[in-house]
Image (cartoon, rainbow, N blue to C red):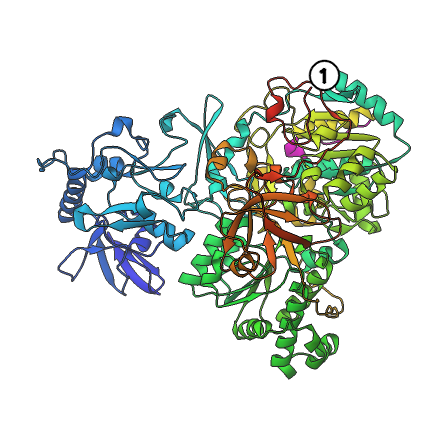
Amino acid sequence: MVSVTIDEQTLEVEAGSTVLQAAERLGIEIPTFCYLKRLPALASCRMCLVEIEGQRRLQPSCATAVTDGMVVRTNTPLIDETRSSMLDMLLANHPLDCPICDKGGECELQDMVMAYGPRESRFRDAKRVFHSEDIRLSPVIIMNVNRCIQCQRCVRMCEDVVGAVALGTIEKGMDTAVTGFEGSLASCDQCGNCVEVCPVGALMSFPYRYKARPWDLVETDTVCPHCGTGCQLTVGARKGEFMRVRSKWEHGVNRETLCVRGRFGLDFVGSRDRIKRPMIRRDGALVPVSWDEAGDYLRRRLSAVESKAAGGLASPRLPNEVLYQFQKLMRTVFRTNNIDCSSRWSTPFDTLGPFVAGFHSRAPLEEVIGNDCVLVVGGNVTDENPVTEYLLRDSARRRQTRLLMLSARPSRLDADARAVVRVAPGAEAAALAAVVAGLVAAAGQALPSEVLAGVGAATGWAAATTGSDGPGRLAAALLDGGSVAVLVSADLLRLSEARATLQQLTNLLRVLRVLGKGPAMQFLFDRANQLGAWDMGVLPAALPGLRPVNDDAARTVLIRAWGAEIPPEPGADLDAMLALCNEGRVGALYIAGSDPLMAYPDRGFVKRALDAADLLIVQDTFLTDTVGLADVVLPAAGYGEESGTFTNNEGRIQAVRKFREPAFEARGNLAILDFVAALRNQALQPSIQGEIFGEIAQLVPAYQGLTPDGLGADGAFTTADPTPPAGEFFAPPPTPNAADRLMLVTGNCLFHNGYLSERSEILNTVADDPYVEMSAWDAAQLGLSDRDQVIVRSTQGELRAQLKVNRHFPRGLVFVPENYRDLRLNSLMRRGEYPCPVEVQKAHAAFATGVEARPESRGRGIAELPGRSPESAPSGLHPQ
């Protein structure tokens, strides 16, 4: 520690701290333009100059390290004169168009001039002008380069944090201009972080342009709904209409950054795709009715199917309180544990439950990835959790964290990784077993005898290797690191080898713990509240708190609190529920906020199952393919129309706040659950969001002690199970056979992650057309070129889209994003088979992009959707 005196106040700071950081700790304000906490110091704006005793010239406080005994002054006549002169120089060429500038009212230059600027300029020359008109750099970014003050925040943010390198500078001195490549942002993520950090109106949001002034907006701090990173954002609305999103540097896991979906993808709240009124099926078609009519109809239908099993599926995009009430409704009113929260995979809870309870680190992501080594397993962080990618890049570059990648697909983070191991989809379990073998072989006698006995001799694990030295390199890096974090992509849960992969992750974390690496683990979910859904017990074999359903003690606690019995046997997951539907054994299937007909692999199987259910109840905000099959449709409030909480990937619980009223005749999700319970002559108590949160905090161990008022601006962390996991080591899986065909995998793309993002008109202006991605080698073998129209064919069906050739892509792999509804990608897949073997060939020029027309003769449709034309209906809905 070193001592520094600033404006006659003395404090001790860590060695290497800057004068600016020390001043901030004392509450002393020093003006800056080019400085940002997340960026290396540039010291170009000269606004933060200070006097340091013993030095002849003023020094930039943002780039001057504190030395022991240093004496600093931040406000002297010389400093005041220098700041005024710097602002005078900036204004010399700055256009004085504040009345029409979108930054007016929140412009840092305006604020600085008011506080420190000259009252009269000494410059009389004509202002230099780069362009007479603004430049549209992309569908969402527009630039007025004349306003630029050359702080280069945008360029550095783009390169150092986002990693896109879409912006740069040309020329020198006062002629320096920020621009994109040839006046465009071809390599841009369209995240808008450059707009966020721009201190003036040089870079602006085109969708927000000329729509409102800051003082016109009612701003609400809430949480992004697009992925599990859980970014804090501030929504601005004018007269109840959504206007824009911005971020605040001091709050949330994201600080000042957002991805394209978070910043520009919230306009889906105003989608024309809303369900306006309740609907019931009459004469084979859905017709709008009143809530009373829907209730009478649903009461009769529920009575008719009471003797059969029921099942429920709820979306992990719903708040914790809704998910908690949903599972309570299913267990106490419908008397079933047939509950699930994923429409894309069936969770192997027997392995997942102990894994999450024993290893998930409910701690700040920045703290977790600050470990010496970070191993990312599976998925593509760039597309699934972009802001998490920003943090990982920052950790690798500034804190020298050893970033290790083990995945089937490449990502932008590979460039910052110390080691990258590419494996075939499904071979992750074998690769992890080989990493464990490498650790055991290297550690040798350093491991306790019981661990060696559990794992077996290293030679016995040799069969788990993948035929490359990649796992060995990962093992060596993990062994060299002092502490280790493991980030696990939820994509691994799609695989038929999901259970084996979780088992080998368990082995790895146990060995790392024995080796004293203090391993931390977190999932990388692409759904905003997936961890919350698990915590709330929206699982067939788990109660709230991830306690097994057949745990008598846990069940007794809930029975006493709820005043109702809970079935003691584990229920059916979504796959098993659909199978039961096909067998005619399901009476009522209740789906809340989810679209399995679009998402679950094997569209034909799902459609047959949903058709076979005696009563299909769909509670949703938007018209989806699954809505088109429903017997009863209940319009629910969407994101921003009700309050609640999300639990993000870190285990951080945050407030999701209401910023608009429910549209049309939609009701809050909690009110709808009460409505359905009342039709069965029962009541869910409590039924108010705050009181439900209180019950969760009382009954779910990880949430105990939390209160809605105590969440704060950054939320609050749930607590991990302090009990170390017990159990034997799992045997390694057999080495997978190499596929002799192209294998299809899916996942998110940067601009879309499905249900919500496809309803964003802004995202649809920046998103690529539906595409098929494969390696340059495979494309050459098939005689294909980039941007060709191709057909992807499986035994189940085929689709057509544009080819994207990626020279970094591994051979034998084909990627198609799951989020383009028109493709109906799941119609190519077969239940229980992932990845899916396919063939790819060039499409005839006459074919349009899209999926092959396949009749879906379900005899169900929508008779009337007010304000909605047949052309705009999603696939599966047939307005008449």
**Is residue 166 positioned above or below 467 on the image?**
above
Q: Which residues are magenta?
A: 682-692
Residue 744 percent location from the top left of the image: 64, 53
Residue situated furthest right in the rendering: 307
Q: Secondary structure at mark 1?
A: loop
Q: Nearer the viewer, residue 9 or 860?
A: 860
Looking at the picture, does residue 668 appear above or below residue 352?
Answer: above
- Apparent side of residue 67 relative to residue 544 in the rendered image (left or right): left
Quadrant assignment for the N terminus: bottom left
Is the magenta region chiefly helix, strand or loop?
loop
Question: Compared to 305, does 793 lie above or below?
Answer: below
In the rendered structure, the answer to whether residue 544 lies left or right of residue 140 reads right
Residue at x 70% of width, y 44% of height = 797
Residue 29 visible? The answer is: no
| For residue 61, side relative to residue 758 (left or right) | left
Where's residue 123, x and y in %? Answer: 9, 37
Please name whichever residue, 434 or 484, is drawn nearer the observer in this view of the structure.
434
Q: Which corner quadrant of the image does residue 136 belong to?
A: top left
Residue 79 in percent (x, y) is at: 16, 48
Q: Does the segment drawn in magenta span residue 513?
A: no
Which residue lies at the image location 43% right of the left edge and 57% below the top edge?
A: 394
Q: Position of residue 792 (x, y in %)?
A: 63, 48
In percent of the image, x 52 and y 33: which residue is there? 760
For residue 374, say whether it is visible.
yes
Left-right relation of 369 to 538: left
Q: Which residue is mark 1?
A: 289
Asked where in the image residue 422 lies, by quadrant, the reply is bottom right
Residue at coordinates 52% horizontally, 75% vertically from top-left? 480
420 over 264 or under it: above or below: below
The amino acid type, in three-letter code, at marker 1 is Val
